[in-house]
Amino acid sequence: MSPTPTNFYDLTRDALLALVASWDFSATHGARLWRYVYLEGVTDWAAMPELPVRFRAKAETEFNFGQLPVAIETHSADGFTRKYLLALNDGRNIETVLMRYKGRVTACISSQAGCAMGCVFCATGQMGFIRHLTAGEIVAQAMHVDRVLRETLAEATPALAAPEDNSPHARHERLRNIVLMGMGEPLHNYDSVMTAIDILRDGSGLGLSGKRITLSTVGVVPGIIRLADEERPVHLAVSLHGATQEERAALVPAAKKWPLDVLMDACRYYIAKRERRIFYEWTLIEGKNDTAEAAHAVGRLLQGQEAQVNLIPLNPTAGFDGEPTGQAAAKNFQAILAEYGLPSTVRQRRGIDIAAGCGQLAVARK
């Protein structure tokens, strides 16, 4: 029985070059293969003429490109958002979202099938945990979005499609931003997520800047500390949602394992070690955590930190009966945060009609 081919997307460039060297081929061939795949979007062996035939024959037997087939593609009425139900090779499915904004494209990608954190207002948390994704399955989502952008360039509006320069990256509408805010808890799948980030940041490939990658956690304290100690160049977003231990634990069950005071210590450690701000996420639920009292509590909790608060009006899910905060209450919340020197934004809602918004991603269990 022949061995199972390696998913190319699982390999960092260094790992690829080491593997190629073990075959007694030049590292130059491995580097060129990397550029074909990540810079030019080529996965057809016959379309890699700069690689020697003998090398291509060997690579074709050793690798597969773990592209994730699209089971369902859904377009939002907003005209800027697409959601993809992608099929994993074990029959499971995950969801990935493409969001267009003026001057940039963002991919919201998943790190797990399901989620073990159980946040009560989150559809992924309501479905429970199924399994971790491999690094290659995480990378494949970004590559899917990149491929879509290549294929739909002619359909894009001139303002979005026009390249900003003559570099190879400007040949098509680029994927510029990654948010690890899809299905799953990224810091619960730390090693695979960080390997995927290393692959996506590689300058010989997609070359995404760490400043354009945001990782969102429900507050996995060991992961936050490790992220700080390893000095990973990504933005950190922490889902807060409650400014007291009791209030937070009612919405975020993980708070029982990592209490609020322990989480705040970890966040302060991260800020001091990395010398960068944390983005705190606060889902605004009408009549529950959107009051002036709640805003003052957030202000007191975060005052003095290098922080920004991202306010997210609740998105509907079948398993939670709360309502989103109105515009006036959200603005009042912002004004109170400003009194404590805390900048804030209200998240622009995208794809709500196709359940592509924050907290809405979920698939049926099998």
Image (spheres, rainbow, N blue to C red):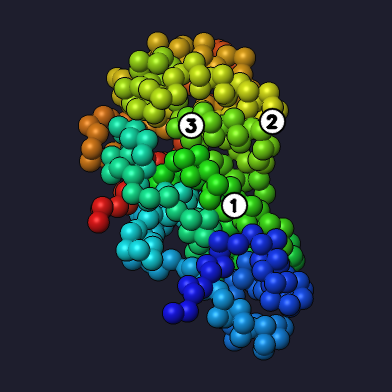
Quarter of the C terminus within the rendering? bottom left
Judging depth in this view, the residue of 365 and 165 nearest the camera is 365
In this view of the protein, can residue 102 be seen by the observer?
no
Residue carrying label 3: 220
Q: Amino acid at mark 2?
A: Arg
> Around disc 1, counting alpha carbons within 10 Å, would you say few (fewer than 14), some (14 to 19), or many (20 or more)?
some
Q: Which residue is mark 1?
A: 195
Q: Which mark is residue 274?
A: 2
Looking at the picture, which amino acid does disc 1 mark? Thr
Of the pair 158 and 80, the residue shown nearer to us: 80
Residue 104 point in image, percent of width and height: 58, 52
Q: Secondary structure at mark 3?
A: loop
Label 1 sits on a secondary structure element that is helix
Residue shown at the point (53%, 43%) measured from the top left: 190
Residue type (three-letter) at the residue carrying disc 3: Val
Q: How far is the residue under mark 2 from the one under mark 1? A: 20 Å
Gap between marks 1 and 3, in whole Å?
Answer: 18 Å
- Sequence-wise first label, 2 or 3: 3
Q: CA distance from mark 2 to mark 3?
A: 17 Å
* Residue at the image point whose x is 69% and y is 27% from the top: 273
Asked whether the residues under the numbered discs 2 and 3 touch, taking CB atoms below 8 Å apart as contact, a structural biologist would say no
Q: Position of residue 195 (x, y in %)?
A: 59, 52
Disc nearest the viewer among 2 and 1 = 1
Residue 8, above or below 92: below
Q: Is residue 285 above or below residue 318?
A: above
Tell me which numbered mark, 1 or 3, is placed earlier along the sequence: 1
